Amino acid sequence: MQTRSIIFMAVLVNLLFSYLMLLYNQPVNVDGILYIHAAQAYLKDGLQGAAQIYAWPFYPVLMAKISTLFHLSLLNTGYILNGFFTSILIIFFILALNTFENSPTVLLWGAAVILLFPALNHDRYNIVRDIGYYAFFMASLWGYIKFLQTEKFIYALFFIFAIILASLFRIEGIIFLILIPVITLVVKYDFKLILINIILSIAGIFLLRHHLTFGRIPELIAYINPHQLFAFFQPHVCNLKNYLGINGQDDACVFLLSGLAGILIVSFLTTYGIFSSLLLAYGIKTRLLPENKSAMQSLIIYIVINIIILAVFLLHQLFMNWRYVFPVVLISLLFLPGILVRLNKLWIGVIYLLCNTASSFGQFGPSNSYIVDAGQWVAHNTPPNTKIYASDITAAFYAERTEANTINKADYIIIINKIHSPSQIPFNTQPVVSFHNKRGDTAYIFKHSTS
């Protein structure tokens, strides 16, 4: 089977999965609501309006443009972009795999591995800019591998173009844009990437000289400033000394750094999965990894830069979200198809994919669709000028009504009462309607007279 056929089938399956996940009717994530509000602000007040709500507004602007172009709701636009970006991600995952595992069998396993990967599937009904970043991040990796293999100028341009697009979704893409050409110059003595970068930097500074403080650029500069990083980190070391006692005070810095390293490792393992981690560890131990030097060099460079970015983030924030380690996870996933094929034990691969399928599409725990149902009931059963008060931002989003600052100024009140975090019901009257899940979490809708 040709690579194109495998990619075509993988994209079709990906779009089917995106549709199936929407049938769960789960509420959109809070970040997605933020992006939609930023897109609404862009449609009303332009770029500055969007930037006031979200400081790096390319994704909301893109949502607004496509929504206007195709006359779609912003929520549906976000879902369509998810399908589009996951398709790009899967295409370049398979193409990157093809650069060092040129075997139809391995590519088929690669398509199955990425399509059934739980962390990716769990985000299909969320509106997240990260998926756009992952897509063009993987595209840039493919371009960089091809550049190191061929040293052709066209792949250098493709890498630069892809990583710039990735940077529009997440600011850390700029770090790759800066470091990759420098590392390539040191390792390969190749000037093409750094020459392109110099030309683009000069043009960018000239064209955008009045916008160098826009969005999150100052934040990025502050993050990579060693003096500011030390000034931020030092107080945490001092605070830790208070808990370590006299004998442990001298090791406070080592203790904190070790803890942060542990957070990073645990975040990777929980996102990558225990089964995947065991397979990867076995493949490394038994030397089942590919031997393509230029491809391996590219992957290692990307992993090292990602780890540097994650380490700096950890030093600043002292926490790690699984989405931040996902680029490293994606690169590490590229090793699994070859390992599964070279194991020559089909049953291991089948069990691995079955476990991932269950984790991806098995709905464990209570559903939150009752929140969506409550908000949509208000949207469909109240006048457009209705004012609401909601105890949950997601319910308020689906209600599509003006929010009042207090209960007394609202026409309808939505109260979300969860079993593990009960809410106070402000009325003795019966709700107009209520929605609940199997666990007993309930959305109450009350009608309130403002007279």
Image (cartoon, helix red, strand yellow):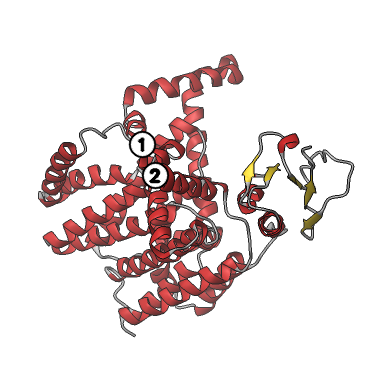
Q: How many residues crowd around disc 1 within 10 Å: few (fewer than 14), some, or many (20 or more)?
A: some
| Mark with earlier residue (2, 1) | 2
Q: Nearer the viewer, residue 418 or 158?
A: 418
The N terminus lies in quadrant: bottom left
Please count the marks in the image: 2
Q: CA distance from mark 2 to mark 1?
A: 8 Å
The kind of residue on which mark 1 rests is Gly
User: Which element carries disc 1, helix, strand or loop?
Assistant: loop
Q: Is residue 424 left or right of residue 215?
A: right
Q: Is residue 219 above or below residue 89?
A: above
Circle number at residue 215 = 1
Residue shown at 66% from the left, 56% from the top = 379
Q: Could you say where residue 436 lies in the image, as x and y percent from the top left?
A: 78, 57
Give the answer, above or below, for where 156 lies relative to 249.
below
Identify the residue at horizontal 68%, vertical 62% (top origin): 364
Q: Residue 50: x, y in percent?
A: 42, 42
- The answer to which of 29 and 118 lies nearer the viewer is 29
Q: Which residue is mark 2?
A: 57
Residue in the foreground of this view, choosing between 180 and 123 = 123
